[in-house]
Image: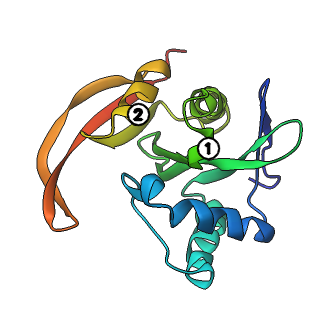
Amino acid sequence: MDIFPVLTTERLILRQFREDDIEEVYRGLSHQEVIKYYGVQYDSLSATQEQMDWFKQIEEDEKGIWWAVCNRHDHTFLGAIGFNDWSKDNRKVETGYWLLPENWGKGIITEAGHAACRFAFDSMSVHRIEAVVETENLGSRKVMKSLGFEYEGTMRDCEIKNGRWISLEMYAKLNSR
């Protein structure tokens, strides 16, 4: 993608990450409630640069795209949403997201998710969007339903996290056009 796609909804703007977002990314990805079900966490601002570099790298390598989710009116940083593990051959991608806790329960990820899914189907030419959700993550399970993803099954005791086995649920949304 030569020009980064900025997406807008009624309340949100989804834009490219900027270097000055690092403090908000760190605030999110070091917060115990945010990282409880998220795959990465950081214990310093300098360590968070790894995540910032990853956002750039997957875009450059055309392996995915992630947006900073911001309030459309005052541009306050709210969280992140995006796609990674983009398989062009199989026309599928995996989605992920996180929000700063003060933004939970407001429908923000659902609103951002609808815009992002439209982009994936229309501009990335994907046929399938996948999401892997820890079974205990009730909030994300609810988001999957509100975004129209279908539950496909549970991979029981498939990963070790914090010294214990966890199970993961697979969800997918197919392009119906």
Taking the image as shown, residue 159 lies to the left or right of residue 11, namely left
Q: Is residue 86 above or below residue 174?
A: below
Left or right of residue 145: residue 156: left
Q: Amino acid at mark 1?
A: Glu
Q: Position of residue 114 (x, y in %)?
A: 61, 26
What's the residue at 60%, 35% (across, down)?
120
Mark 1 or mark 2: whose residue is earlier in sequence: 1
Return the x and y of residue 71 as percentages of the image width and height: 79, 39
**Residue 102's disc number:** 1
Residue at x 41%, y 33% (from the top left corner): 139
Image coordinates for residue 98, horizontal then vertical, percent: 53, 48
85 relative position to 17: left or right: left
Q: Position of residue 40 (x, y in %)?
A: 43, 65
Q: Which residue is mark 2?
A: 139
In this picture, is 17 found above or below 140? Answer: below
Q: How many marks?
A: 2
Q: With 155 as the anchor, is 130 left or right in this view?
A: right
Q: Amino acid at mark 2?
A: Gly
On the question of residue 61 being in view, the answer is no
- The residue carrying pointer 1 sits among few (fewer than 14), some (14 to 19) or many (20 or more) residues within 10 Å by Cα, namely few
Disc 1 from disc 2: Cα separation: 14 Å
Q: Quadrant of residue 117?
A: top right
Residue 31 versus residue 109 in the image, above or below? below
The answer to which image quadrant residue 49 occupies is bottom right
- SS at badge 1: helix
